[in-house]
Structures are given as C-alpha cells and as structure tokens.
Amino acid sequence: MWNQLPAHGDAEHLLETAVHNYFTYRANLNRLEFRHLLKQGCTSLIIGLAFLAACTLTSQLLRRQAGTLPIVLREGLIIAGWVAMWRPMEIFLYEWWPLLRTGQLYEKLSRMRVEVEKRIDSDNAMAVGLTNAEARKRLAELGENRIGSQRRAGAFTFFIAQFKSPIILILIGAAVVSLFLQDRTDAALILAMWRKQ
C-alpha cells in the first residue's frame, strides 16, 4: 500500500498506530455483532421452542378429530413448528463461526507490525504519474481496468443453490423419513413446504 506520509521519522509510528486503531475498532465492532447474533439466537430459540410446543399441543388435540382436514392440519402444525426452529438452528450451526473467525483475524491485524519503505520507481511514476507512452504500453500489456461481466447462473446451478439452506436439508430429510415410514401424506406435505421456501 502506498500513501503520502509526512516527511519526518515518525511516519512509520503514525501509520502503525492508525492501522492498529482501525483494526482494533473493527474487532470491537465484530465482538458487538457476535454478541448481538448470540442474543438473537437465544431469543429465536425461545420463540421457536414455544411455537413448536404450541403446535405440538394443538396437533395432539386434533388427534381426536376424524377426517382428512384434521389430519392435514395436524401434520401442517408439526411441520410449521419445526420450520420455526430454522432460524436458531441456522445461527447456532452456521452463522456464529464465520463471525468468530473474522474477529480473530481483526485481532491479529490490530497487533501486526507495520513497516514503511520508500518506493523508488525508475520512471518516477509515484511522484509525477505515468507518461503517455508508459500508459499506452501498460494498456497494451495489461488491458483496460474493467470488471469482467458475470455469467448468469443456469437452471441447474440455481437448483443446486437451494440445498445450501439448512431448512431445505431438514425438510428433505423429513420427507425421506416419512417415505421410509410409508407415510405418503406427510412426505407430500413436507415437499410442498420445500417448494414454497
């Protein structure tokens, strides 16, 4: 990284202090975000468990009713109760560790050693910029400074991307277990819930 620094011997100390302060600030922000995520996870877990308990209790009360509609309602309530557990599972299984890893990186960067070295360029580009000839030469060698266009994802890629969500995997697993237990009604309802996600 090149920067115009004051021409005195304290430049390295100033830059090192600035870099350390910045990454310390980012580490503190990350720590707050991590605590907020865990608090949100605990709140989501309490809400999810309460909703799951209410759905399970209501489903048990509907067991006394005969007919297709009570069966559909009963199974739908069980599925809805487990779907409500998606957010706490996502937080406690997947979302906390990338934040923790980023925080550890910021902590390391806040303690790293910073050195300032003077760059000497043969064409003095840092002081006066590139000449027209040098700019044309670099343009011919390296090409234009543009971000390449992104290819659109195909239907297969879009289909595979659905399986990155933990709730989709849970629903598919529940459907497979239902089919294994020869309960086609449950499997159909679960797969219908998957298509709505």
Image (cartoon, helix red, strand yellow):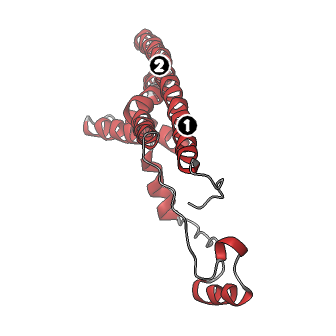
Outermost front residue = 9
Q: Residue at x 63, y 70 (%)?
A: 147
First in sequence, mark 1 or 2: give its number: 1
Q: Which mark is residue 21?
A: 1
If the image is split into quadrants, where does the N terminus sit? bottom right
Residue nearer the viewer, 120 or 131: 120
Amino acid at pointer 2? Gly
Element under disc 1: helix
Q: Which residue is mark 2?
A: 48
Q: Position of residue 177 (x, y in %)?
A: 29, 36
Q: What crowding class fits label 1: few (fewer than 14 Cα within 10 Å), some (14-19), or many (20 or more)?
A: some
At label 1, the amino acid type is Asn
Image quadrant of residue 169?
top left
In the figure, is residue 80 to the left or right of 14? left
- In the image, residue 56 lies at what x, y percent? 41, 15
Q: Point out residue 68 in the picture as x, y percentages from the top left corner.
A: 47, 25
Is 174 left or right of 103, judged from the image as shown? left
Secondary structure under the numbered disc 2 in the rendered image: helix
Asked which quadrant contains residue 96, the reply is top left
145 is higher (above) or lower (below) than 38: below
The reply to whether residue 19 is in sight is yes
